[in-house]
Amino acid sequence: QVQLEESGGGLVQAGGSLRLSCAASGRTFKSYTMGWFRQAPGKEREFVAAIRWYTGYTNYADSVKGRFTISRDNAKNTVYLQMNSLKSEDTAVYYCAGGSPPGLQTFVVDTYDYWGQGTQVTVSS
């Protein structure tokens, strides 16, 4: 079992930064790929970034490349999403997820088994 808890969301002006945290617990969480997804009102849940716990392999949506960075802290069992140069279109509820997406398919929502409750990120312009 894996439990995930997000924090760090809030209101920020366009061009600003936020860092989201996802605290992971459970016996097998280190075997998972950890992902960040987001969902805006009326929109589909979309992939943002992912990291494989053991290898550190990362993948990013084209819309956030160069602006967002996913990372992990083994000592704290925590995954982070550093978000810089935020835009109004980044406004969404951000979800932390854990799963086993095969190969390079870290962007596939249905391959993730565990989800946090989400944290709201609002970017004002």
Image (cartoon, rainbow, N blue to C red):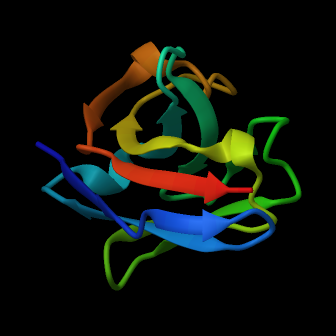
Nearer to me, 124 or 101: 124
Nearest the eye: 13 or 45: 13
In the rendered image, residue 108, in percent from the top left (x then y), is placed at 55, 19
In the picture, the quarter occupied by the N terminus is top left
- The residue lying toward the viewer, choosing from 75 and 116, is 116
Can you say which quadrant of the picture contains the C terminus? bottom right
- Left or right, 49 with respect to 38, comes to right
Q: Residue at x 54, y 16 (%)?
A: 43
Relative to residue 102, is residue 51 depicted above or below? below
Q: Quadrant of residue 78?
A: bottom left
Q: How many marks?
A: 0
Vertical arrangement, residue 4 with respect to residue 83, above or below: above
User: In the shown orientation, is residue 68 left or right of residue 55?
Assistant: right
View extreme (bottom): residue: 75
Counting from the top left corner in percent of width and height, residue 61 is at 75, 36
93 or 56: nearer the viewer: 93
Identify the residue at horizontal 60%, vertical 68% (top origin): 12
76 vs 18: above or below: below
Q: Is residue 95 left or right of residue 25?
A: right
Left-right relation of 104 to 114: right
Q: Is residue 24 above or below residue 100?
A: below
Residue at the image point whose x is 32% and y is 45% from the top: 118
Residue 71 in sight here = no
* Picture coordinates of residue 100, whole percent (x, y): 42, 30
Residue 74 appears at what percent x and percent y? Answer: 40, 77
Answer whether residue 34 is visible to the viewer in this image: yes
**Splitting the image into 4 quarters, where does residue 90 fall?**
top right
Instruction: Give the residue at the far front of this rendering.
Output: 125
